[in-house]
Amino acid sequence: MACIRLKENCEFNGESAYRHVNTHLPSYARPHFIRIKSAIKLTATFKYRKVQLVEEGFDPAIIKDHLYFLDDKENLYVQMTQDIYNSVKTHDFKL
């Protein structure tokens, strides 16, 4: 998963993000999930706070931020839904 903050007045484009990731990253390094945050918290030593992000995982019922899933069949990042989450958890949809 990658957690990013967009510039002001910018919107996430799943197709453009997929093309960029597919062009510049090897397959093993491509994030399956992209989480959009309005602000990213830092520690006292200016490191990113990741513990809470790890604990929340990718459950759309818990996460209030926008969360996108890498769909290789459609060649884009699609918004994560509860149905996709349930399919992943029941192993109907493999990552």
Image (spheres, rainbow, N blue to C red):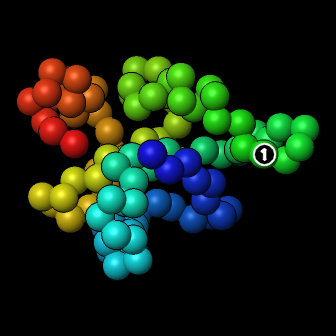
Q: Residue furthest left?
A: 92
From the image, tell me which residue sits under label 1: 47
Q: Residue furthest right?
A: 44
**Residue drawn at x 41%, y 77% as measured from the top left:** 24
**Residue drawn at x 58%, y 53% as measured from the top left:** 4
**Mark 1 crowd level (few <14, some 14–19, many ≥20, 10 Å Cα):** few
Q: Residue furthest bottom?
A: 23
Is the C terminus in the top left, top right, bottom left or bottom right quadrant?
Answer: top left
As shown in the figure, which amino acid type bears the numbered disc 1? Lys
Question: Does 6 sit left or right of 85 as displayed?
Answer: right
**Residue drawn at x 45%, y 28% as measured from the top left:** 57
Question: Does 29 sit left or right of 85 as displayed?
Answer: right
4 shown above or below 18: above
Residue 67 rendering spot, x and y as whole percentages: 43, 42
Residue 38 rendering spot, x and y as whole percentages: 65, 45
Residue 30 rendering spot, x and y as whole percentages: 37, 60
**67 or 90: which is nearer to us?**
90
Which image quadrant for residue 94? top left
Is the N terminus in the top left, top right, bottom left or bottom right quadrant?
Answer: top left
Question: Does 81 sit left or right of 74 as displayed?
Answer: right
Residue 14 visible, this angle: no
Residue 44 rendering spot, x and y as whole percentages: 90, 38
Badge 1 element: loop
